[in-house]
Image: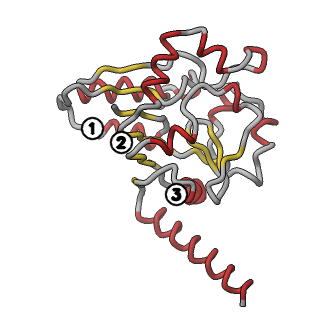
């Protein structure tokens, strides 16, 4: 069972999949949909395209990625929708998870789509460095509980850690800290990136180590 996130880099990966038949493969969305602001890179579109390339069965999470403030809690919404509940239960039983890594610095899809208020995102600045499927974490990999956590429809970071193969797909200067946090939090155990990004990641870790040595000497 393959569970997929969203994002431009992940879309490029799916675009590159050779058409083949993988027997009995199931493709599942990791999170609800972002909407028109994410046209072409949204969870449902990426899951659909991957299922088409691999001749697999696709399971959609047909709901907003984050419910509006007046819509109640995600838990109650999921409980009231059996099909949605089934898809999410499959997503939590992934054999392989492939996700993009969001950056607090540059990724504004959730606010652009009106799923969260800019003020809610601003509350995370200086604390969180990135997210996986709307679940935010800091540079040390510690989860940052958001004001919209109980409105988020999708897998959580515990589900991510429970998956055996956890692939993060990300590149660019703004993704260095999210990658570091995801690695430290053990949210990914495979990284697909580019040489420049990886070199910047290594340099950041080396700089942090030097600072620790200075403080301790």
Quarter residue 138 falls in: bottom right
Placement of the C terminus among the 4 image quadrants: bottom right
Quarter residue 147 falls in: top right
Q: Is residue 20 left or right of residue 152?
A: left
Marks 1/2: CA–CA distance: 7 Å
Determine crowd level at label 2: few under 14, some 14-19, many 20+ residues with C-alpha closer than 10 A.
some
Mark 1 or 3, nearer chain start:
1
> Dot 2 lies on which element?
helix
- State the image coordinates of residue 75 (x, y, percent, origin top left): 65, 20
Residue drawn where x is 52% and y is 66% of the image:
201
- State the image coordinates of residue 59 (x, y, percent, origin top left): 40, 19
Q: Are marks 3 and 2 in contact (CB under 8 Å)?
A: no
Marks 1/3: CA–CA distance: 25 Å
In the picture of the structure, the residue carrying the numbered disc 3 is: 183
Mark 3 or 2, nearer chain start:
2
> Dot 3 lies on which element?
helix
- State the image coordinates of residue 108 (x, y, percent, origin top left): 65, 38
Task: From the image, state whether disc 1 or disc 3 is nearer to you.
Answer: 3
Q: Are marks 1 and 2 in contact (CB under 8 Å)?
A: yes
Q: Is residue 50 left or right of residue 177?
A: left
Residue drawn where x is 48% and y is 54% of the image:
171
Placement of the N terminus among the 4 image quadrants: top left
Residue drawn where x is 48% and y is 28% of the image:
43
In the picture of the structure, the residue carrying the numbered disc 1 is: 17
Residue drawn where x is 62% and y is 42% of the image:
107
Determine crowd level at label 3: few under 14, some 14-19, many 20+ residues with C-alpha closer than 10 A.
some
Q: Is residue 206 above or below residue 83?
A: below
In the picture of the structure, the residue carrying the numbered disc 2 is: 13
Taking the view exactly as shown, the residue that stands out farthest to the bottom is 217
> Dot 1 lies on which element?
loop
């Amino acid at each position: 069972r393959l569970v997929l996130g969203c994002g431009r880099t992940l879309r490029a990966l799916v675009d590159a999949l050779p058409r083949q038949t993988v027997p009995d493969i199931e493709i599942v969305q990791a999170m609800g949909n972002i909407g028109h602001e994410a046209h072409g890179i949204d969870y449902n579109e990426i899951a659909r395209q991957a299922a088409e390339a691999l001749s697999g069965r696709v399971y959609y999470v047909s709901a907003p990625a984050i419910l509006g403030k007046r819509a109640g809690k995600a838990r109650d919404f999921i409980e009231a929708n059996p099909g949605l509940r089934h898809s999410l239960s499959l997503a939590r039983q992934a054999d392989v998870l492939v996700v993009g890594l969001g950056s607090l610095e540059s990724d504004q899809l959730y606010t652009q789509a009106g799923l969260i208020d800019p003020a809610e995102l601003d509350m995370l600045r200086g604390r969180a460095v990135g997210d996986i499927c709307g679940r935010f974490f800091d540079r040390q990999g510690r989860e940052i509980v958001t004001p919209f956590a109980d409105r988020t429809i999708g897998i959580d970071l515990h589900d991510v850690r429970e998956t055996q193969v956890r692939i993060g797909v990300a590149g660019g200067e703004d993704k260095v800290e999210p990658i570091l946090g995801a690695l430290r939090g053990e949210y990914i155990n495979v990284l697909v990136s580019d040489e420049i990004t990886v070199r910047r990641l290594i340099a950041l870790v080396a700089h942090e180590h030097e600072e620790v040595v200075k403080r301790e000497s």
